Amino acid sequence: MGLAASQARLLTITSRKADCEFESMRLSHEKIALSRDMERISDEYQNAMNQTKLIYDYYGTGTSDMALTYGLLMTPSVYNDYYPRLLTDKSNRVVLSSVYASAAKAAGIPVEGYNGTPSSEVRNKFIEALRDRGVISAASAASIESVSYNNAVGLGATFSATAATQDITYNEFLDLIKAKCVDTSDYGDTLPLNGSYKAISYPNTVYESDGANGDYWNIMVYDSEYGGNYSLITNTYKASISLYDLLTTDKQYIYQMTTTRGPTIPVTEAALMQQVLVGNEQSPSFLNWITDQFSAILGGVTENDLALQYAYDRVSELIYPSEKIQDTAARWYDYGYAEWDNADWSRTNYGHNTEGSEWHDLLPEIATKAAHAYECEGVNGECTSNACNYLGVVYSSCGSGSRNGKNRRQTIAVDLNTVVQTFLTAFMEYQQGLENSKYSYENGQVKHEQDGRTIANLYEANSEDIFKIKAPTDVADGTDNLLAGFYDTLFNRICMSGWTENENIENLEYMQELMKSGAVYISSMANDGNYYQSSYSTDTYISEVSDLEGIAQAEARYNAAKARIENKENTIDLKIKNLDTEISSLTTEYDTMKGLISKTIEKSFKRYEA
């Protein structure tokens, strides 16, 4: 190689080596930056591990998961004893959301309040402003305005919501149920306790069957007087069941769904069962039917109303333990029902009965709380008969065999008698005192001894048990004035203490952070009828617990960020390694080329010396 060419190559090697060294240094700095990022997200994760949330523990059991929200505090219900629980600032002014503040402005209430309470005309303007902003209905507003304004409630006075009561025995209680309560067939228009199967109306999707392939919801009844077998009580759309029968007869009413349509049925039909049995507080569900029938006899007595709400919550938890079932069933429904005949697709996506498959791992969610995971290789009769022995849902799931073979038959069932008995048990538990409860209805069989203890222990009726009911009277007992009392109290506190607007106060996390930081306080009514301000930590209804959901989300974010950073670090390490290899090669070539140039120059000098 000529001297000029060697020198040009040497310059090229020098330039490339400098570029590689610069890139290696840049990558090293990028890796240091990633280390700082990793340290930051680790700190965030550690802080999140101590994350807490505030819950409203109305029943004082320490097990409530009711979120502490602004709406819960400012909406009349049994949970606040029909008195507003106010958020107040350091000046004791009531903290109002934008809609409440707008109503206060419309009524002409100054932010500093009045030196006393104004006229009923101002109160009615406030009520009408709440109506116009959708806080209360027009009917509620009219009802409140029909009640004389109480300008002393919350300022040292209370309103009475206590009805005159009378005691009745359990047998008299049953007589009233028989006389006053309506059957399921007379309750609502969409309580499909019997007849053709109609799947949940997931978005834009409805699946119906007339039972031709064995797909149907029905009520099976076991009656020892008629051969001791299970039989379908009716082929009509609605089954007629009375609360009296559920509490008194030996008949066992089993609500079940049987199908031959694939292994995911226990999940998709658990989702439907949740909606039919529990639904929400407005739907004509089986649980709402139970609650309304008991309320027809026991309602109007404060302690009974609280106990009925407690019973409703406990049964809801029993039958509706997991939103995951609804979410997964909706997803499967959208993608799965169009592919039932494609066995390879179904097997790939659902895994049939294979452990570790998504649907199989979800089955314990159906059995959360008291349900029993009963898997069989037989026909649906085994599932039906086992439903009588367990609280909650029982299912049989068999994923093998032909489409119409018995081993492909899926059944999910629940004993309606036990659901009603659990409701009554929870009612009695609340009445007799939660702290000394002798009942158990969350896990296992109805009557079963395990390790010397009773897994489930339900209330057993005693003819001498006493129930309180609202006494017949023509005198107004104050229960019709609950709404008026609640909003009169809120109005009086705003007028006396003043108010301040916070447009973000309805944001759950924001409100709770304000409470934790001491920026706002809880003000509630004491026995003397006055409101007193205190910290959330001293409020008997509010508990601070670990935010398990928030921690789980933080952990997921941490793991995702950590994986991202580690991937980047691995990529950088590989690039640096390749650069080091190239730099080493360039250094060797540089030394060789430099030596060659030196020898060429040396030969040239010797030639000229000669």
Image (spheres, rainbow, N blue to C red):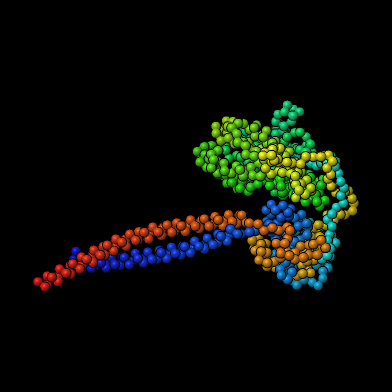
**Image x and y of residue 549, in percent:** 61, 54
Q: Residue at x 77, y 49 (%)?
A: 433
Q: Residue at x 76, y 33 (%)?
A: 250
Residue lying at the far right of the rendered structure: 474
Describe residue 372's horizontal placement relative to residue 82 as left or right: left
Residue lying at the far top of the rendered structure: 227
| Closest to the observer, 428 or 213 | 428
**Image x and y of residue 330, in percent:** 60, 46
Q: Which quarter of the rendering shows the N terminus?
A: bottom left
**Image x and y of residue 16, in percent:** 31, 65
Give above or below for 3 relative to 247.
below
**Image x and y of residue 607, in percent:** 12, 70
Give residue 371's quadrant in the image: top right
| Closest to the observer, 577 or 404 | 577
Q: Residue at x 59, y 30 (%)?
A: 406
Describe residue 391's horizontal placement relative to residue 334 as left or right: right
Q: Residue at x 73, y 34 (%)?
A: 252
Q: Which quarter of the rendering shows the C terminus?
A: bottom left
Give residue 533's quadrant in the image: bottom right
Describe residue 393's horizontal placement relative to residue 436 as left or right: left
Residue lying at the far left of the rendered structure: 610
| Closest to the observer, 394 or 428 | 428
